[in-house]
Image: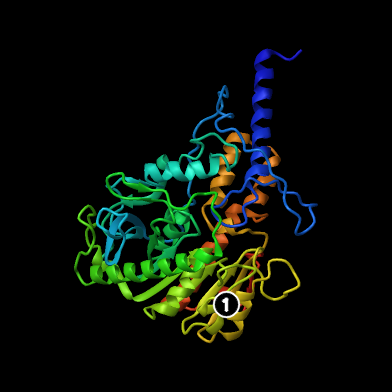
Amino acid sequence: MVNSGHSSHIRHTLGRRGLLAGGLVAGLGAALPGVAQARLVDPDRPRGAAPQQAAAPARGVQAQGDPNFHPVQFRLPKPTGRKYLGTTSLHLIDDKRPDPTMPSGKRELMITLWYPSSLVGGSPLAKYMPRRTAMEVDDSWTGEYGLALPTGTFDFANTETHSRLDAPMQKMKHPVLLFSPGYQYSRFVNTALAEDLASRGYVVVAMDHTHETPTEFPGGRFLPGVPATQLPDPLFTRQYVETRVADARFVLDQLTELAAGRNPVAKDSELPSGFGIGLDVRRVGMFGVGLGGYATAATMRADQRISTGLDLDGTLQDDRRKGPLAEAAKKGLKQPLLLFGSDETQFTDPKKDYFDLSWATFWAVQKGGKLNLNLAGAKQKAFTDYQFVFDQVFRDIYGDDPIITSVMTALVGKVDPAQSVRAQREYIAAYFDTTLRRRPNELLRQDSPEFPEVHIRW
């Protein structure tokens, strides 16, 4: 006979497993980053047939009566460089762009910088996200169209990073890397990569694009951005990209002011000690995920101050199937651009799935230097922190349940999260070291047995 306590444990375990499976059905039809659609993923459904609609999962069900539920804090992979890390967030106001929805009547942005610091300790470790942003991002994964997990599962607000809050910047010049997140994504969901690059001697500047990505301003003012259920309409994609380009150019202008010893930031932001001294605005690169990769290429075409770029799985056209192509795809760039794709992007065979005409066109016309890497087994979310966040959260809740493998494959692909993080860090750092620091790296010359999941094409 099974005792009641053991029986209750089994019911809770099976209930949690059922909810995860339900979340897999309901939430993993996401065709684009940051969007969870309530669709039943049916691998046997003929191409072009309409997907079945799944019932929206009930919110909070798993938490009710489940003594094992708790918010999950996760562990960021340790940075691999030698530098101590600092981080700070700045509030910027663009006086040249009106925005009547903002208190200033002007375009307002939030940026976060990760940078080499001269301080070992003293300052507290920064949290992964500010509290209101953390609630919004958690809700996008646990809400009506999410993973059928209870609200509060992802404890982003109490997860610690490896960076000291407002620590002094190391007083020597460091190359600058602008970062533009995926569509609807917070600027914080690539913190692990930003910290690793900063530990290797870069200043990484991540931008939230107000009204599209969730943005929290000093004092608690919060704008949620585009709703999680809203697909990127091709009619507005170009507008989003143009806004991101203007944001990036404005941020670079402000960094140039800071490097010159002036302080253009809003009055509610304070600068860490030695801040401007550490910015080398003569050596600037840019990278982004998804729509952020598209924005990277577009910004490089518009602004020659950005001397190198990296597109993480972002199409260079307004609609993956219908176009139109971006100017960067049609005419190429004067600067080098690395295309780093998942298994959801290929440009060598138009007859196969996931063919991207914009990448093929760009590859044919690009004169400023080009490189293509493929992260085999990966989906686009593998280029974000979600690859290890999901893995840790699911294992914390479900232990070693085999269903986790299915869920992770649906979300980020078959690539191992730890190996994926390690490979991305090494190849991305090698690329920027080569193009910004003139330090050629053999890793970019041929496939490496150390990273069998990465394939190179010149």
Q: Which residue is mark 1?
A: 371
* Quarter of the figure with residue 329: bottom right
* Image coordinates for residue 170, horizontal then vertical, percent: 28, 63
Instruction: Provide the secondary structure element on which disc 1 rests.
Output: strand
Q: Nearer the viewer, residue 94 or 72?
A: 94
* Amino acid at dot 1: Leu
Q: Residue at x 49, y 79 (%)?
A: 440
Left or right of 345, for residue 310: left
Quarter of the image with the N terminus is top right
Confirm whether residue 302 shows in the render: yes
| Left-right relation of 212 to 323 | left
Q: Position of residue 366 (x, y in %)?
A: 55, 84
Q: Residue at horizontal 54%, vertical 39%?
A: 143
- Return the x and y of residue 232 as percentages of the image width and height: 54, 59
Apparent side of residue 120 relative to residue 28 in the rendered image (left or right):
left
The image's colour scheme reads rainbow
For the C terminus, the image quarter is: bottom right
Given residues 348 and 404, the one toward you in this image is 348
The front one of 204 and 407 is 407
The answer, for residue 172, to whether it is visible in the render is: no
Name which residue lies at 46% across and 82% down: 335
Looking at the image, residue 205 lies above or below residue 361: above
x and y percentages locating residue 336 in the rendered image: 49, 80
Disc 1 crowd, CA 10 A, few/some/many (<14, 14-19, 20+): some
Answer left or right for 348 relative to 157: right
* Number of marks in the rendered image: 1
Say if 151 sits above or below 281 in the image: above
Nearest to the observer: residue 359 or residue 260: 359
> Which quarter of the picture shows residue 304?
bottom left
